[in-house]
Image (spheres, rainbow, N blue to C red):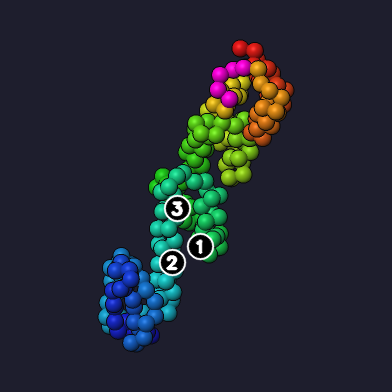
């Protein structure tokens, strides 16, 4: 069985340790893994133990990258699963194991994401309930959670008014081209056409 003959701290990454078996470099592990498993010079390891160490190290490495991915903003389970696939973690059982740990530690929660997403959209890019629901659905959020956050989405009439004021200033009679442009914009945000016409007409007359 292979015997550890050298353990050398990495030059580029001091938190990694290069393991040499029979005086030949084999692979690198984190310092934590080396300490956890009591790896030292002269220790004999079975091929199965070596594969387990490599597999655990890969999992820890990917887990750290996912934590960094989650540090910028809330994410959905689907987004994390897609990122794991990108990191070449394609085994569904491994994906599930990592996702379960992230959820148990409070790092991953679709409801938290949905609430954050709706609040962000309401503040920076107001859209219709239909449009927001479709966006959440595309990100993997369940219908049940979408229903839970639906109350956060503001009254659509008021939302349209806020968009009109933000983009056009105070209410006034709009020129044809200006009206066509704002009507098109509101339509692209997912608002129903009859609602758009009604609110814009009311806004112009104020």
Give SS at disc 2: helix
Q: In which quarter of the image is residue 68?
A: bottom left
In the rendered image, is residue 112 in sight?
A: yes
The span from disc 1 to disc 3 (Cα, nearest Å) is: 12 Å
- Indicate which disc residue 58 carries: 2
Q: Which residue sits at x=52%, y=56%?
A: 83
Report the magenta residues as a range: 168-172
Q: Which residue sits at x=54%, y=61%?
A: 86
- Indicate which disc residue 87 carries: 1
Q: Badge 2 local density, few (<14 within 10 Å), some, or many (20+)?
A: some
* Sequence order check, earlier mark of 1 and 2: 2
* Sequence order check, earlier mark of 1 and 3: 3
- Indicate which disc residue 69 carries: 3
Which tag is nearer the camera, tag 3 or tag 2? 3
Which tag is nearer the camera, tag 1 or tag 2? 1
Residue 40 placement (x, y as % from top left): 27, 77
């Amino acid at each position: 069985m292979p015997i550890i003959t050298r353990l050398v701290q990495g030059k580029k990454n001091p938190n990694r340790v290069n393991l040499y078996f029979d005086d030949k470099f084999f692979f690198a592990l984190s310092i934590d893994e080396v300490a956890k498993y009591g790896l030292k010079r002269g220790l004999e390891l079975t091929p199965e133990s070596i594969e387990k160490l490599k597999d655990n190290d890969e999992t820890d490495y990917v887990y750290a990258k996912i934590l960094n991915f989650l540090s910028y903003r809330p994410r959905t389970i689907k987004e994390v699963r897609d990122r794991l696939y990108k990191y070449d973690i394609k085994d569904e059982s491994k994906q599930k194991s990592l996702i379960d740990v992230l959820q148990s530690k409070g790092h991953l929660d679709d409801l938290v994401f949905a609430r954050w997403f709706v609040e962000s959209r309401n503040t920076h890019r107001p859209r219709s309930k239909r449009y927001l629901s479709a966006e959440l659905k595309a990100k993997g959020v369940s219908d049940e959670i979408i229903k839970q956050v639906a109350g956060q989405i503001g009254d659509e009439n008021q939302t349209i008014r806020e968009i009109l004021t933000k983009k056009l200033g105070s209410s006034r009679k709009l020129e044809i081209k200006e009206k066509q442009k704002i009507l098109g914009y509101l339509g692209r945000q997912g608002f129903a056409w009859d609602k758009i016409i009604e609110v814009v007409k009311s806004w112009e007359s104020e």
